[in-house]
Amino acid sequence: MNLTTRVKLSAMMFLQFFIWGAWFVTLGPFLGATLHATGAQTGEVFSTQSWGAIIAPFIIGLIADRYFNAERILGVLHLIGAVLMYQMYTAADIAVFYPYVLGYMVIYMPTLALVNSVSFNQMNDPEKEFSSIRIFGTIGWIIAGLAISYLFHWDSPEGIQAGLLQKTFLMAGVASALLGLFSFTLPATPPKPSVGKVTISTLLGLDALKLLKDKNFAVFFIASILICIPLAFYYQNASAFLTDIKVDNPTGKMTIGQISEVLFLLCLPIFFKKFGFKWTILVGMLAWAIRYTLFAYGNAGELSFMLIIGIALHGVCYDFFFVSGQIYTDSKAGAQYKSAAQGMITLATYGVGMLIGFYVAGKISDSYNSPAGHDWKMIWLIPAGIAGAVFLLFILFFNESGKTAVDSSEPKGRLEV
């Protein structure tokens, strides 16, 4: 891969995740302060991510993979996304806002797989080359958060009161338009020749359901769905929580989570090799319970360090559970069902699990909200308890011993979202 191509792919990844980080992190405070959304309505808005994850395989598998160059459909989707972002920017109430955010997520989630496809198509050795490109996506997310907090101060108490969080959609829309136009300059990634008939069960990974006959994989599958319930609490409530208790520069501080994600991703292979899959994923589950307990008892004053530690645990929470889970799934599936198994886990977690999670998080937030404000202690202790219960479920019923063999010789295809 030559330098020009490397620079283009890095810029693509930067913009791809800058767009997401520019509005999604502050979505909770925006919905509450500007659109006066209830907890249930906020949950419905966040669940659009799950609907996007469910619909994405159809767009990629039935359209992009069969008829159009990946970089061209990437450009078209981001240009449409820019228009939808502008509509979200101008929306004055939740009823107007919701259809636009739903439409946006339906077209954004497929682009996560498309940028991977464009990248892989240019690489001779994806295992060695991809991480150095993908890291620019994390940098893009971090830069977006730092800009919101430290450059524009949109998430300050004064900024939120003045409705400045609305400008995050304008910033994301401009970046989306730039990436949409830039995508047409990316290296050509033509559709792959079709091999056999593409079925709905193949697109959704349902061909891999037979893996559930393995008791240990079935336990992992159920745990993956259940752990997404506490995960949804973080996505939906963390930014609103930090804003509500008057933490300075909350969006900027939340980028600590992305930094830790990079660091712990580097540690994961060492931990995985030394302790095996079961203990790696158990550490990830336990980290969710610990982080929410820290949120429950921390504050913006003398106990603010508890909040920072909780945010920094994001790398353990995400990498040790979800990334190690993808590795485990890959090793259990075998060559025939690799793509199908990853598709099934994606559908189960970001689809079914997160849908349930956002619904539960919305209901809990409303239940512990009063004229005096949110009872954040209870709002965080409940997902901490759920994570703890999943931890116990897994340690009791998952009995597979030894190290999990990893076969990473086959790069993931476009159906990965």
Image (spheres, helix red, strand yellow):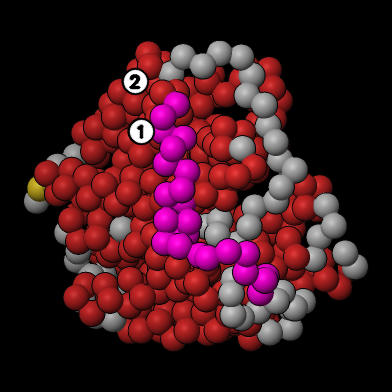
- Image coordinates for residue 307, horizontal then vertical, percent: 43, 36
Q: Are marks 2 and 1 in contact (CB under 8 Å)?
A: yes
Can you identify the residue that label 2 sits on?
393
- Image coordinates for residue 176, horizontal then vertical, percent: 54, 78
Can you identify the residue that label 1 sits on?
222
Q: Is residue 104 left or right of residue 369?
A: right
Question: Image quadrant of residue 404?
Answer: top right
Instruction: Classify 10 Å Cα crowding around label 2: few (below 14), some (14-19), many (20 and above).
Output: some
Q: Is residue 24 above or below residue 360?
A: below
Question: Image quadrant of residue 106?
Answer: bottom left
Q: Is residue 124 magenta?
A: no
Gap between marks 2 and 1, in whole Å? 10 Å
Q: Secondary structure at mark 2?
A: helix
Q: Is residue 341 above or below residue 94?
A: above
As drawn, the residue found furthest toward the right would be 2
Residue type highlighted by circle 1: Ile
Q: Residue at x 41, y 23 (%)?
A: 215
Q: Which residues, given as a range, are shown in magenta?
A: 191-214
Between circles 2 and 1, the one closer to the viewer is 1
- Image coordinates for residue 397, horizontal then vertical, percent: 38, 16
Q: Is residue 205 left or right of residue 12?
A: left
